[in-house]
Amino acid sequence: MLYVSRTWWNFTMLNGNSVAKLNISLRGGLIQPGDEGYDESRKVYNGMIHKTPRLIVRCANVADVIRSVNFARENDLLLAIRSGGHNAGGLGICDDGLVIDLALMKYTRVDPAGRTVIVGGGCTWGDVDHATHVFGLATPSGIISTTGVGGLTLGGGIGYLTRKYGLTIDNLLSADVVLANGTFVRANADENSDLFWAIRGGGGNFGVVTSFTFKLHQIDMIYGGPMLYELSETADVMKWYRELIPSAPDDLNGFFAFLAVPPAPPFPEHLHLKKMCEVVWAYAGPLTKAEETFKPIRAFKEAVLDLVGPLPQPALQNMFDGLYPPGLQWYWRADFVKELSDEAIAQHIRFGNTLPSMHSTMHLYPVNGAASRVGKNETAWSYRDATWAQVIVGVDPDPVNNEKIISWTKSYYDALHPYSAGGAYVNFLMGDEGEERVKKTYGDNYERLVAIKNKYDPDNFFRVNQNIKPTSKTSETIAA
Ligand SMILES: Cc1cc2nc3c(=O)[nH]c(=O)nc-3n(C[C@H](O)[C@H](O)[C@H](O)COP(=O)(O)OP(=O)(O)OC[C@H]3O[C@@H](n4cnc5c(N)ncnc54)[C@H](O)[C@@H]3O)c2cc1C
């Protein structure tokens, strides 16, 4: 039997009228190698990722998505789905296949009375904040406004409002989904509830989500920002922080981080590029109670720099956008953490002292509070008993330093992993961590996810993701 490579086969098969036919059937458009804008369109947020898709379809509506899904399936093309393109492992793009780029689907519709928002699959969180803030409303998202709603939501969604209102998926009411066979379904508590369970944490494994409906909360102003401490005080700060977060009121959130102070305002010049540690706070309770809430925090230790104060919710959401523009080199490793032991803190101090670049960091995001009051089998997200999602991030603008940031990230992770809870937040996994790591992350929800994958995507058509492999069929090799 003669085996041919998928790339060659697809190239030959697509050399007909089929691509032209697809093109005229679209309201958006498609881009192929050699077209103007192709190189720009295949870039993703992580500058380390360089992939060359055969087709990029810029979908304008659900019809374009259905046509693209059918085209990819009928032509046996690998399919990637791109919302914000932020995935560090580059899972929003693929080599040789078809990319469904949702960026044109940027609509939002707020129902201020019902406190919901309908969000197109191509929106970033900045788009959502823009639409909801004018009504003094918000839903839990992340910490950077350029991140896509699609990937962040389907993986779970951790951010400033997690302790008060839960993960992003805990606020998802309904989703419109195009399945592998091209059918369009709605997933919510009443319709296709198994699919609704799976997409709340199971990533892009089950279909293309063209629209999300979220619950909104009355959030207008936040009392928040960073408080910076000397690096030499890390042990004190971490030991105090590990006691504070498990018992803090839900209104209070704060992630711990290492940083090299950015050489720009609002940071004073004498601190520029100095290695420090910080807690980035977000208090979402009544502003009249904010100063009082922060009294014990300020009494614990005088910060070297205290930038915490009242600010509009979107201002906190985009505070770090300028520091992390698209195109930087990213490599990260993650774990869930239940407790911060003295031994783990000693390792954090060791690696915090050797941050390899100005952009590199380690964040500990609280995932307790409201997020921990949802049962571990109520959604696909299994680690409801973790206290933090930890992510170690090597970042640098210059690819020359890739070896340096990757080796620091891996060594730091190797030193900390023994103190972790086992799995990691799927959205903080790279693309190279393997099936076992994905299984660990879903724990005893994994088997149920496989059963739902068998039902909705038995051929593993949606596999450019942290893949949940179906057990019912395989179609890996094309024989000729
Ligand atoms: C700078 C930065 C900051 C971050 N901060 C946070 C944070 O605060 N909180 C947090 O929880 N995460 C955070 N993340 C992680 C982020 O959630 C993931 O990178 C996520 O994958 C990004 O989503 P995206 O839509 O931008 O990604 P993309 O690269 O577009 O897509 C990523 C994956 O999601 C799937 N996908 C995306 N959209 C859809 C859709 N509509 N239907 C089906 N599948 C889809 C794709 O198949 C792909 O596998 C951050 C990432 C970066 C780089």
Image: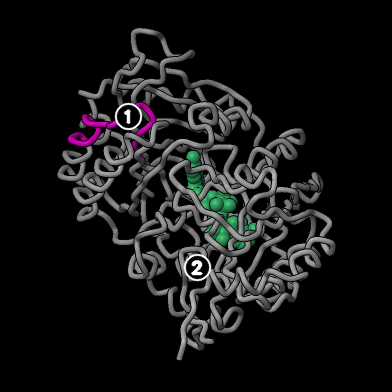
Query: Is residue 336 visible from the viewing direction of this image?
Result: yes
Q: How many marks?
A: 2
- Proximity of marks 1 and 2: CB atoms separated by less than 8 Å: no
In this image, 96 relative to 280: left or right?
Answer: right
Residue 26 versus residue 7 in the image, above or below: above
In the image shown, does 28 or 194 lie closer to the viewer?
28
Numbered tag placed on residue 357 in the rendering: 1
Q: Quadrant of the C terminus?
A: bottom right
In this image, 463 relative to 173: left or right?
Answer: left
In this image, 307 relative to 285: left or right?
Answer: left
Residue 401 versus residue 5 in the image, above or below: above
Q: Residue at x 67, y 43 (%)?
A: 37
Which secondary structure, mark 2? loop
Residue 403 versus residue 173 in the image, above or below: above
* Percent x, y of residue 420: 26, 55
* Percent x, y of residue 431: 41, 58
In the image shown, does 107 or 240 lie closer to the viewer?
107
* Percent x, y of residue 475: 51, 83
Q: Quadrant of residue 228?
A: top left
* Percent x, y of residue 436: 33, 70
Which secondary structure, mark 1? loop
In the image shown, does 461 or 49 lie closer to the viewer?
49
Instruction: State which tag comes first along the sequence, 1 or 2.
Output: 1
Q: Residue at x 38, y 36 (%)?
A: 399
Query: Is residue 168 visible from the viewing direction of this image?
Result: no
For label 2, being within 8 Å of ligand 1 is answered: no
Q: Residue at x 57, y 22 (%)?
A: 310
User: Which residue is label 2 attached to?
Assistant: 380
Q: Residue 310 lies in magenta, yes or no? A: no
The magenta segment is: 349-362
- Amino acid type, callout 2: Ala
